Image (cartoon, rainbow, N blue to C red):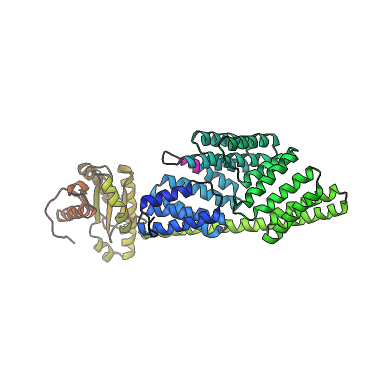
């Protein structure tokens, strides 16, 4: 990096370092991600910019800016799907799953977590292979299916070992142990926690404060109070040494320490730790921890025999719990509203996009759609045939009958062309490109075969019973056909010009026919 400038390769490497790391200092990582997003803009690489935007949005989500981050994540999710960027799609699925977790939508979270795993392929990094399987295991567990989740946790653990993802493996084991603990399987929780400790010792890793707090809580639940106290002292020591930048966590750690000390029969020291936790909860606004502070205070009062105070604290705990539930419901409702508005905006944008690419009268694709799609089709398929169909004597229909009748004719012809093309070239399309002109695109169809098949459609139009629309006035079409390979290099403009030339040849020869292969221009026949 030189004067705030990076090459695409340098930026990609810097992004990968952020994408594939266990984040412990979120503010630092967020600042780095925002800077990489800024640097990606001038490089002109849409894929690289989308990666940088997603990285910043994921970090933003973790800082608590849910509304902004969610909208950005879903926009990148759409871009990745539209451009077939499978690795980015896998990452956006995982990020969207996290957003739905915050919204309390466990079913949608599970669906997206499964998609994040299914999208993994050879382009996925080793970190993603482990992390996304962990995300699926957590989603399954929180949907109440631990028996199904455990094999996924084991798979994530095994992959972490096989792929040398040692730091990420501590996250796998920590989260697995914590979920076993919260679902009440203390024996399994202790077993996984012991593997976590053994893993850290074997690889010289310092467990972060959050992992130590998990281990301390499990030790308390299993009656290992002295061990839990030692674990929590180490946890707090590492937090104070700056191994975590989340100031809110200290309230949690002091609470766990208080529980360990109470179990050891040291209520005075437990009260001191609990007072520290309570003060931090009040200072930093931590209602979820405060509920458990009230519960622990009731236990300490009961130990001292002050049952009246214990009862009062239980009441305070219940009130705080109800208030917390209300806040959580409000927060989830707000997140769901953001998700709904984001989805609604995407649907509205897609409706506008579809409207902009379709003819309002016939419902067929329009010239804009042709200009967006046909060049890529021509580049990929040298045997594409294009045909321009024109309604014969259409001005006479409008003048003799009415413009409304002319519109009805165009709509009916559109249906006949669509059904006819679907039978002969199901991967092709029909578009209205002018007043009474239609374009038919036939992939992988040599011109002689296209001309023969289009003549069947011409016959179908001419033999259709038009009496309910035009009375005795006949309706026929003329068609000019061309192959994209007739010009070098192949191009949309050359192919359409050749088809147009052949259409005029059909008109010149008497109308109601299909013409291909002319070389000289014909004068336009009205």
* Foreground residue among 117 and 433: 117
Query: Residue 172 at x, y = what percent?
Result: 57, 40
- Tag count: 0
Q: Is residue 226 left or right of residue 506?
A: right
Q: Is residue 314 left or right of residue 170?
A: right
Q: Is residue 75 left or right of residue 27?
A: left
Residue beneath the point at 17% across and 55% down:
501
Query: Residue 459 at x, y = what percent?
Result: 25, 47
Residue beneath the point at 22% across and 45% down:
451
Q: Main secondary structure of the magenta part?
A: loop
Query: Residue 252 at x, y = what percent?
Result: 68, 51
Q: Is residue 244 left or right of residue 486?
A: right
Quadrant holding the N terminus? bottom left
Instruction: Check residue 261 for magenta coloring.
Output: no
Task: Say above or below: 117 vs 339.
Answer: above
Task: Say above or below: 69 vs 201.
Answer: below
Quadrant holding the C terminus? bottom left
Which of the 4 image quarters holds residue 411?
bottom left
* Foreground residue among 377 and 120: 120
* Foreground residue among 376 and 132: 132
Which of the 4 image quarters holds residue 191?
top right
Asked whether residue 358 is in view, the answer is no
Instruction: Check residue 121 for magenta coloring.
Output: yes
Asked whether residue 32 is in view, the answer is yes
Task: Say above or below: 142 vs 74.
Answer: above
Provide the residue span drawn in magenta: 115-125
Query: Residue 449 at x, y = what percent?
Result: 22, 41
């Amino acid at each position: 990096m030189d004067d705030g400038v990076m090459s695409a390769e340098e930026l990609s490497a810097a992004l990968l370092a952020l994408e594939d790391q266990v984040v412990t200092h979120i503010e630092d990582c967020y600042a780095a991600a925002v800077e990489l997003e800024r640097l990606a803009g001038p490089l002109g690489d849409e894929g690289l910019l989308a990666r940088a935007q997603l990285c910043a949005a994921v970090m933003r989500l973790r800082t608590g800016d849910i509304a902004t981050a969610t909208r950005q994540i879903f926009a990148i999710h759409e871009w990745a799907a539209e451009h077939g960027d499978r690795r980015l799609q896998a990452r956006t699925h995982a990020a969207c799953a996290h957003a739905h977790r915050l919204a309390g939508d466990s079913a949608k979270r599970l669906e997206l977590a499964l998609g994040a795993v299914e999208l993994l392929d050879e382009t996925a990094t080793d970190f993603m292979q482990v992390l996304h399987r962990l995300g699926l295991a957590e989603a399954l567990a929180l949907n109440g299916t631990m028996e199904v989740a455990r094999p996924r946790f084991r798979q994530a653990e095994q992959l972490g070992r096989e792929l040398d993802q040692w730091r990420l493996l501590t996250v796998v084991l920590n989260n697995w142990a914590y979920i076993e603990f919260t679902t009440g399987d203390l024996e399994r929780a202790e077993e996984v926690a012991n593997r976590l400790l053994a893993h850290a010792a074997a690889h010289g890793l310092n467990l972060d404060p959050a992992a130590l707090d998990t281990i301390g809580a499990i030790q308390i639940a299993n009656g290992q109070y002295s061990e839990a106290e030692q674990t929590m002292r180490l946890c707090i020591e590492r937090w104070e040494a700056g191994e975590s930048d989340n100031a809110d966590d200290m309230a949690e750690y002091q609470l766990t320490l208080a529980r360990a000390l109470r179990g050891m029969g040291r209520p005075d020291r437990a009260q001191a730790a609990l007072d520290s936790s309570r003060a931090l909860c009040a200072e930093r606004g931590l209602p979820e921890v405060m509920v458990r502070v009230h519960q622990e205070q009731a236990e300490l009062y009961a130990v001292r025999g002050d049952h009246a105070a214990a009862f009062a604290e239980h009441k305070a705990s219940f009130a705080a719990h109800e208030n917390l539930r209300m806040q959580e419901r409000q927060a989830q409702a707000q997140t769901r509203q953001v998700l709904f508005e984001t989805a609604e905006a995407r649907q509205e944008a897609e409706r506008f996009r579809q409207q902009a690419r379709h003819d309002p009268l016939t419902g067929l694709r329009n010239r804009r759609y042709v200009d967006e799609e046909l060049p890529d089709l021509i580049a990929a398929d040298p045997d594409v045939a294009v045909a321009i169909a024109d309604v014969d004597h259409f001005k006479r229909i409008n003048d003799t009958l009415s413009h409304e009748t002319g519109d009805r004719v165009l709509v009916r012809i559109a249906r006949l062309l669509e059904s006819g093309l679907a039978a002969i070239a199901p991967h092709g399309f029909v578009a209205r490109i002018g007043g009474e002109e239609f374009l038919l695109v036939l992939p992988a169809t040599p011109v002689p075969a296209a001309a023969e098949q289009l003549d069947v459609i011409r016959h179908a139009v001419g033999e259709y019973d038009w009496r309910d629309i035009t009375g005795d006035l006949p309706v026929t079409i003329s068609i000019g056909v061309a192959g994209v390979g007739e010009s070098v290099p192949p191009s949309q403009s050359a192919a359409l010009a050749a088809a147009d030339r052949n259409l005029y040849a059909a008109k010149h020869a008497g109308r109601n026919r299909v013409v291909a292969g002319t070389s000289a221009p014909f004068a336009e026949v009205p």
